[in-house]
Image: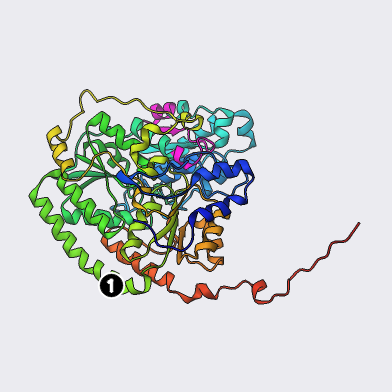
Amino acid sequence: MSIDHPINPAEVKEEILKAYPPKVARKRGKQIVVNEVGEDAAVPEISANVRTTPGIITQRGCCYAGCKGVVLGPTRDIINLTHGPIGCGFYSWLTRRNQTKPPTDEHDQFMTYCFSTDMQDEEIIFGGEKKLKAAIQEAYDIFHPKAIGVFSTCPVGLIGDDVHQVTAEMKEKLGINIFAFSCEGYKGVSQSAGHHIANNQLFKHVIGRNDTPLEGKYRISLLGEYNIGGDAFLIEDLLEKCGITLTATFSGNSTMDSFERAHTSDLNCVMCHRSINYVADMIEKRYGVPWIKVNFLGAEGTAKSLRKIAAYFENKELMDRVEEVIEEEMIEVRKAQEEVRAQCEGKLAMLFVGGSRAHHYQDLFAEIGMPTIAAGYEFAHRDDYEGRKVLPDIKIDADSRNIEELSVEADPDNYRPRITEEQAKKYEEAGHSFKDYEGMMPEMSSGTMIIDDISQHESEMLIEKYQPAIFCAGIKEKYTVQKSGTPCLQLHSYDYGGPFAVFEGACTFYRTVDRMVNNKLWSMIEAPWEADAKPEIEAAYVSG
Ligand code: CFM
């Protein structure tokens, strides 16, 4: 499949690179790729998960953000304590629109609080361990939580506070689960490093502590769904409707208890591959739970994912129920598609988001006839672009080597293969696959542009050249995109909209996009200096 557009993407690439000094242009040249899908879903190689050149305005976040903000943030009954100056805690507080629903007011809900040790100059000079201990004690005395997680910010690593020693001591003293993350902001090249560190510590300190499974015939866990704008609530409802029991979600609307028994599920379903594939692999190795890739964004993806889950359990009753639910839900979906299609069809979308959404949301656009002309991740790795088949070819550089790789073996008591080899073969013969993610590029048309870690300059050039109908990104890009007269849909938080998951959310998405791309307001945007050609400030060179 090739995209039909008069602009030559190779020329756009060349023009983008012209603005850079030669060395930078060479580096960026490997991260800007014109897609070409060949046989067996072969795609060109893209450079990813590499350092951003200083001076380039990137949209990336830091390792601490990936660990504390992304993976642990949406869990309501752990106290997430930031060890560092107050800014890190404050700026990672409630910025992702994670939502959670404790069953009653009596249940712990700490997500609305911001906990920090508020390091001062004195601790930077003489060490912050004493203050950290006191903060853990204080949090415990006031809230009596089940667990406390301590997150290291940059200065903690630089001065060498031993957060693991302090948390081990306090765990012993207080008798609750307390553990720390060495997720200093500077580790790795982006928030992706923080995901890995979070995965490791959850696996070491939490998963596997409760062997009692939830009641239910078809037990699954959902990995890589963070309940942005309420997405996880819709997924939970849908699974319940199908009769599927959700043991744990990493980590939207989640609790420590659900993590502790996550290994008792019979199947792990991975939404965001980038942020949580490590946990999926480790649970499989230690406990024998296989994982499959799912996508609950887009009506077709949702239907496909439900069918994949049902096929795994090989149960006629479940398969029938899933078909019934799909049929029922698709009535409204078709209606919504019909409503917007004529006005949306053929309009171009661009998506530059994180490490999975730039891919998943393309399905939603495709469902209303909008092709994606350019897309990219901020911090994903080559496997998220090209598919897991390239894993053996990925070179491990010094930045990745910095992150601990846990060596995991089968648990002598708790390892239990969930299906036989024969069953696995049958499943694969039916067209499903385990432990696989095909990546974004094979599913995009040839001739589209793929840009890793896009910069401000590059986004502006793309908008100027292609004039897309909509640009999906985050808060950092939003206003410059809008000032160019292009609507910007925030896919990290949905601003005030959403949720967009499953069938119900898909209908909301179609209607939201229709309103955005067909709103005349954007074409009326004119800066004051454009309306009045006279410059507001006049100056002249004075010769010396
Ligand atoms: Fe996964 Fe995410 Fe994403 Fe991500 Fe993120 Fe996010 Fe994202 Mo913002 S875990 S990679 S680190 S789906 S916070 S919920 S929206 S960049 S595309």
* Magenta extent: 168-194
Task: Choose between 506 and 41: the one closer to the eye.
Answer: 41
Front-most of residues 443 and 420: 443
Which residue corresponds to the image point at 25% horizontal and 34% vertical from the top-left? 210
Residue 425 location, quadrant: top left
Q: Position of residue 249 (x, y in %)?
A: 30, 46
Picture quarter containing residue 180?
A: top left
Q: Where does residue 438 sit, x and y in percent of width and height?
A: 32, 44
Q: Residue lying at the far top in this picture: please name it.
A: 412
Residue at the image position 19 percent from the left and 54 percent from the top:
240
Percent x, y of residue 212? 19, 36
Horizontal side, residue 483 vs residue 194: left or right? right
Residue visible at 33% across and 50% down in the picture: 253
Residue 472 is a magenta residue = no
Quarter where residue 97 is shown: bottom left
Residue found at the very far right of the displayed protein:
544
